[in-house]
Image (spheres, rainbow, N blue to C red):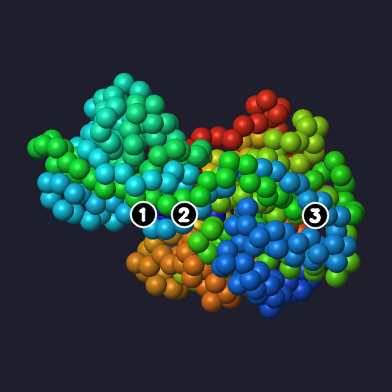
């Protein structure tokens, strides 16, 4: 799952989610046979294989690395052995890796070391220069996000042509990519972007530029950024910025696509999980847990000789951590006719978080923007199942940080499960789901410690069963997601099927 600089979840009542949703047209399907066959032991078997792959490949399974290539071979071999038709879809993407921790310190007038982070796709550099703020920084911040710092070329004083200078930019309005590009165009040697300052937008800022930069780009918290800005108002300030990164403009990676041999080819259920990890760790929860669950579900469907009514297309996406690039590539390469045959997308990204919550993607919009028509019915498949198990759920917004984004941008109904990432569990959630209030759902999120020891088997059991139930319910139902029982999607033409702009990753504002 891709990183957001800020990730918050608006809580529903600490009860089983009940919201005003349209009645589902989907048939009630008895999925017990499949759920009983899908086991935590089976999921963990695949997780151990992914861990071994990471161990043999410098601790990572990131797209563009040998660890990812080995993961692709493992998934391909597993799905072929289970009887699926498997194809590999290669594509190129901009590969980024941080080679060393960044450094940011004030040299004059007061020696100060700052906690900082390298933005994805930052250039490598060692710069000591004068700090020059944009002309539109807002301190104190407005009640609602409003800063346009760095969004226009005119926000920058043209940099010196003889002395190194570092642009200081506040988060807000436009993407980090635009801010950094404008700084480069104005002649700056490095960039510092600090958080905007509202609640939830005040911690150490990190994120992605979405495109390779030629200069170092690092982040600061609002408090440190505001203090640095205040110092520049009193006189010249010099900082030292160091980054060490690797950028490969056209690295090769792939998606693995595995289809059931049976099922109506004109009614396709795409079930997705990203296979890649971040470069800093093995990604056994993010997203080995989703990939391993799909492998186990697919194997058990085959072992039980279950015959789907609709065709199931399992896709293990590459380069999700680089900006959901695998899923975007997949959707972009489909014709209008092919898009129209996909009636739903189920996404499973992180299902084993140690301090988990049973989050269900919010198809009806009760916790944010609704998904395309039909998404509310998918949400209801999940919430009805968990209500029947006397298990609570909470909605989580479609915020663009996983592979469903390309599908909902194309008008395809979507849904899925999520056990939580870097967000912090509330006391209310701890009372319902157990675990520890005040701690992240996954304290090893995007770190080297996201290993086989970073999994909650109870989460894998509960969310694995929920995934199996929804997959088989949608694959077996005689009727579709709409009130007239149809499967026809609202898929847009390819020209219109472009990723939406989200508060996340390439589009962080």
Which dot, 1 or 3, sits closer to the camera?
Answer: 1
The Cα atoms of the two marked residues, 2 and 3, are separated by 33 Å
Q: Which one is earlier in the sequence, the residue at label 1 or at label 3? A: 1
Which dot, 2 or 3, sits closer to the camera?
Answer: 2
Which residue is identified by label 2? 98
Q: Residue at x 25, y 54 (%)?
A: 114
Relative to the observer, which residue lies in front, 18 or 32? 32
Where's residue 331, x and y in %? 70, 39
Q: Residue at x 88, y 62 (%)?
A: 83
Where's residue 48, x and y in %? 65, 75
Residue 106 seen by the camera: yes
The Cα atoms of the two marked residues, 1 and 3, are separated by 40 Å
Which residue is identified by label 1? 102
Dots 1, 2 in contact, CB < 8 A? yes
For the N terminus, the image quarter is bottom right
Indicate whether 16 appears above or below 6: below
The Cα atoms of the two marked residues, 1 and 2, are separated by 9 Å
Indicate whether 193 appears above or below 113: above
Relative to the observer, which residue lies in front, 233 or 235? 235
Q: Residue at x 26, y 44 (%)?
A: 128
Which residue is identified by label 3? 258
Where's residue 311, x and y in %? 83, 50
SS at mark 3 in the image = strand
Residue 115 occupies which quadrant of the picture?
Answer: bottom left
| Mark number displayed over residue 232 | none
């Amino acid at each position: 799952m891709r990183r957001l600089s800020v990730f918050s979840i608006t809580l529903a009542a600490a009860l089983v989610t009940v919201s005003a949703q349209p009645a589902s047209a989907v048939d009630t399907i008895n999925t017990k046979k499949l759920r009983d066959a899908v086991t935590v032991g089976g999921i963990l078997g695949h997780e151990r294989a992914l861990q071994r792959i990471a161990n043999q490949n410098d601790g990572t399974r990131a797209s563009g690395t040998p660890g990812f290539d080995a993961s692709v071979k493992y998934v391909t071999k597993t799905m072929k052995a289970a009887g699926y038709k498997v194809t590999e879809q290669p594509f190129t993407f901009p590969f980024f890796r941080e080679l060393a921790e960044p450094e940011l310190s004030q040299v004059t007038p007061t020696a100060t070391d700052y906690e900082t982070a390298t933005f994805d796709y930052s250039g490598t550099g060692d710069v000591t220069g004068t700090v020059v703020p944009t002309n539109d920084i807002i301190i104190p911040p407005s009640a609602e996000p409003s800063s346009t710092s760095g969004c226009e070329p005119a926000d920058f004083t043209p940099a010196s042509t003889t002395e190194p200078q570092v642009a200081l930019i506040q988060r807000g309005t436009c993407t980090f990519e635009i801010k950094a590009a404008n700084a480069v165009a104005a002649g700056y040697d490095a960039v510092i972007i600090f958080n905007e300052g509202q609640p939830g937008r005040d911690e150490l800022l990190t994120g992605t530029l979405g495109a390779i930069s030629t200069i170092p780009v690092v982040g600061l918290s609002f408090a440190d950024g505001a203090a640095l800005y205040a110092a520049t108002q009193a006189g010249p300030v010099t900082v030292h910025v160091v980054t060490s990164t690797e950028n490969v403009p056209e690295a090769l990676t792939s998606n693995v696509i595995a289809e059931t041999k049976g099922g109506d080819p004109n009614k396709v259920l795409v079930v997705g999980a990203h296979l890649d990890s971040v470069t800093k760790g093995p990604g056994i929860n993010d997203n080995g847990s989703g990939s391993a669950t799909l492998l186990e579900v697919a194997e058990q469907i085959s072992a039980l000789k279950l015959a789907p009514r609709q065709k199931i297309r399992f896709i293990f996406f590459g380069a999700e951590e680089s900006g959901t690039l695998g899923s975007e590539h997949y959707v972009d390469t489909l014709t209008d006719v092919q898009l129209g045959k996909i009636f739903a997308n189920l996404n499973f990204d992180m299902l084993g978080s140690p301090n988990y919550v049973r989050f269900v993607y919010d198809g009806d919009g009760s916790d944010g923007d609704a998904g395309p028509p039909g998404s509310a019915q998918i949400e209801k498949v999940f919430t009805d199942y968990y209500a029947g198990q006397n298990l609570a759920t909470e909605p989580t917004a479609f915020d663009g940080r996983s592979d469903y984004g390309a599908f909902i941008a194309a008008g395809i109904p979507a849904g899925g499960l999520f056990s939580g990432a870097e967000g912090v569990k509330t006391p209310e959630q701890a009372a319902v789901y157990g675990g520890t209030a005040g701690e992240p759902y996954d304290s090893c999120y995007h770190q080297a410690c996201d290993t086989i020891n970073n999994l909650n088997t109870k989460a894998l059991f509960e969310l694995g069963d929920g995934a199996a139930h929804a997959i088989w319910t949608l694959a077996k139902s005689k009727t579709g997601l709409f009130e007239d029982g149809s499967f026809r999607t609202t898929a847009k033409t390819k020209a219109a099927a472009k990723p939406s702009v989200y508060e996340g990753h390439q589009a962080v504002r």
